[in-house]
Image (cartoon, helix red, strand yellow):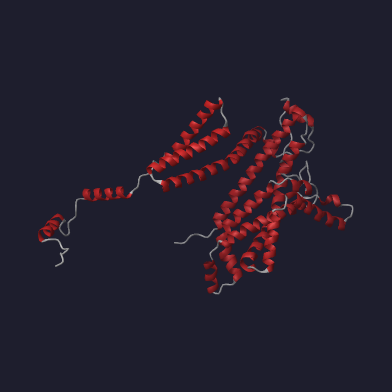
Amino acid sequence: MQKSNLPSQPEAQQSQAQQPAEGGSAPRSAQKKNKKNLSVALKSKQLPKWAPWGVAAASIVVAIALTFLFLGGFNVALAAALAGVINLAVIFGWSFSVEGQRKAVDRVATTLVTSAFAVACIPLVSLLWTALERGGPVLIEHPSVLNRTMQGMKGVLDQDYVAGETGLAGGFYHAIVGTVLITLASCVISIPIGVLTAIYLVEYGGKNALARGITFLVDVMTGIPSIVAGLFAFSLFGTIFSLVNPGAVGSAKTGIAAAVALSVLMIPVVVRNTEEILRLVPMDLREATYALGVPKWKTIVRIVLPTAISGILSGITIAIARVIGETAPIMVTAGFAKNLNWDLFSGWMSTLPTYIYDSQMRPVSPGVAAAASSERAWAAALILIIIVMVLNLIARIIAKALAPKAGR
C-alpha cells in the first residue's frame, strides 16, 4: 500500500492549534518580522551608495600623491590617467568580492561612461570659464561696448586706455546687429526648405530615384567646407549683379549673400535632423488617422509635426549654433564693416565672429595697446556664447509649449 501524504490526526490538530482562529489575526509584530526576514533573504549584498564617489575621490588623492612622490611635482595628464586606472581597479575588485562578477562588470562600464562624459565636459567648461574670466570684467567695467561701433576708432584711443588715461573706446554693437540679421535671414531661407525636404523624404519619397538623389546631395552638402559655401554665394550674387550692372561686381558683398552662404551650411543639418525625428513618430498614429479618412497632408500637419516638434526644434537649434559662429563665409560674402548697417541688401556687414577675428588679427593699435582690441574680442566672444545659449533656451521653451500634452 502507498503511504498517504496527509498528516496524521495529532499533527493536524497541532497545526490547527497553532493557526489563528478564523476571523482572528497573527500578531502584527510577527508578520512584520517575517516580511523583513524575507526581504533581507531576497536581497543580495551591495556596495554602499557612496562607494563610486568615495573611490573616485580617493583615487584622485592617491594619483596626485603619486605624481608628487615620483615626479617631484604635479602633472595634470598623468594624475588624471593614474586616477582613472586606480578607480577602475579598486571599484572592480571591491564590487567583485562583494557583489559578484556581473555587478562588477556593470560598475566598470558605468564608471567608463561617466568618465567619458566628464572628459567631454572639460573643454566646454574650460571655454566657458575662459570667456567669463576674460570677457566678463570687460562687460562689467565697460558696458558701453554693447552700444558703440568701431566707426572713427583710432589707435591713440587704445593707447590712452592701456596707459590708464581713458576708458575703453569702441564697441561691437554693429557686429551684434549683423549677427542677428544674417542669422535670421539664413533661418528664413533654410528652415522651410530643410523641413519640407525632410517631410518629402519620409512621408512621400520612399525609395524612389528622386528621394535617393536628394539624400545623396544632402550627404554631400553636409561635408562642404564653409569657405566653399561662401565662395558659392559670392559667385552667385556676383553673377546676378554683373548681369544688372557689369561694373558693380564688388557690390555683391552684402548681408543677404552671407545669409545664403550660411543657409547652404544649415539646410543639410536641418534635413538630416528632421528626417531622423520624423522617422521616430510611430506609424500607428498615421494609420489611425488614415483609417478615419483624414487626408495625408492634414495627418502630417496635425499629428506628425506636433509629435516631432521638440526634436525638430532641437535640430534647428543645432543648425543655428553650427552657422552662427562661422567666420570664413562671412568674410567672403559680407566683408568687414566698422559702422552699423541695417540693410541686408546693400553694403558690407560685420558679425561677431568676423569682428573677433579682425580684432585679433588686425588690432586698432599694434604693440602693447593691442590688449584693448583683445579685450573687446573676448567680450564679443562672451556675447556670442550668450546668444547661442539664449537661442537654445528659447527653442526648449517653444518645444515644451507646442509639444502634445500627455493624456491619461
Q: Relative to residue 403, is residue 175 depicted above or below?
A: above
Classify residue 160 as left or right of residue 192.
Answer: right
Residue drawn at point x = 53 percent, y = 60 percent: 404
Q: Position of residue 12 (x, y in %)?
A: 13, 59
Task: Determine the residue positioned at 39% across, 46% down.
Answer: 100
Q: Position of residue 369 (x, y in %)?
A: 75, 29
Left or right side of 129 for 166: right
The quarter of the picture where the C terminus appears is bottom left
Quarter-of-image position of residue 159: top right
Residue 146 placement (x, y as % from top left): 69, 39
Of residue 375 and residue 146, the one placed in the foreground of this image is 375
Where does the image place residue 309, in percent across and percent down from the top left? 58, 58
Q: Find the residue positioned furthest to the front.
A: 1
Does any portion of residue 188 appear in the rendered image?
no
Image quarter of residue 238: bottom right
Closer-to-camera residue (96/283): 96
Can the viewer see residue 217 in this picture?
yes
Q: Residue at x 78, y 42 (%)?
A: 339
